[in-house]
Image (spheres, rainbow, N blue to C red):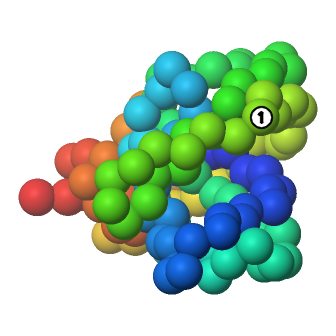
Amino acid sequence: MFVHFRAQLAHTGAHSLKVVKVYLAGTKCVASFPPIVVAGPYDEPVQVHTGVRPILSNGRQEFTRRAVLVDQFGHKHQTEPIHFQPSPNPIHHPQAAIGCHFCGQPVAMEDLAESAALFAHKKCVR
């Protein structure tokens, strides 16, 4: 399941932090996006994207969870609870389906290769 949220990330340390993994409480990260650099206390809000398992909603259900952000040192930082609302799932709309990088066929979330950096079927990744 892919989730997206906007967050104001800040810290008071002397050096930048890099968020290398994001997941929701009670899930695990299965699709990482580029790291987010948090320079200090006055950074602008950022859009956070991640893919998690297990799937928490059937696409019509709202839910609330805390996000867990893991920095480059392995330290975990939790957000306040975030309310997620359903959005259209492109997998259910053939014209907008996300295709496998290798074979071009649509990729359902349950067939997504966890170890791939690109959208790909488990069977297409060795």
Name the spot of residue 83 as percent of width and height, x first. Answer: 86, 30
Q: Nearer the viewer, residue 117 or 70?
A: 70
SS for dot 1: loop
Q: Nearer the viewer, residue 64 or 104?
A: 64
Q: Residue at x 75, y 73 (%)?
A: 41
Q: Quadrant of the C terminus?
A: bottom left
Name the spot of residue 90 as percent of width and height, x first. Answer: 72, 49
Q: Residue at x 64, y 57 (%)?
A: 49
Q: Which residue is mark 1?
A: 80
Task: Say whether residue 57 is left or right of residue 37.
Answer: right
Q: Residues within 10 Å of mark 1 (few under 14, many from 20)?
A: few
Task: Say whether residue 81 is left or right of residue 113.
Answer: right
Q: Residue at x 85, y 21 (%)?
A: 62
Q: Quadrant of residue 110?
A: top left
Q: Kindly tell me whether residue 60 is visible in this rendering.
A: no
Q: Kindly tell me whether residue 88 is visible in this rendering.
A: yes
Q: Amino acid at mark 1?
A: Glu
Name the spot of residue 104 as percent of width and height, x first. Answer: 44, 66
Q: Is residue 55 above or below residue 95?
A: above
Name the spot of residue 7 as percent of width and height, x first. Answer: 79, 57
Q: Residue at x 33, y 61 (%)?
A: 73
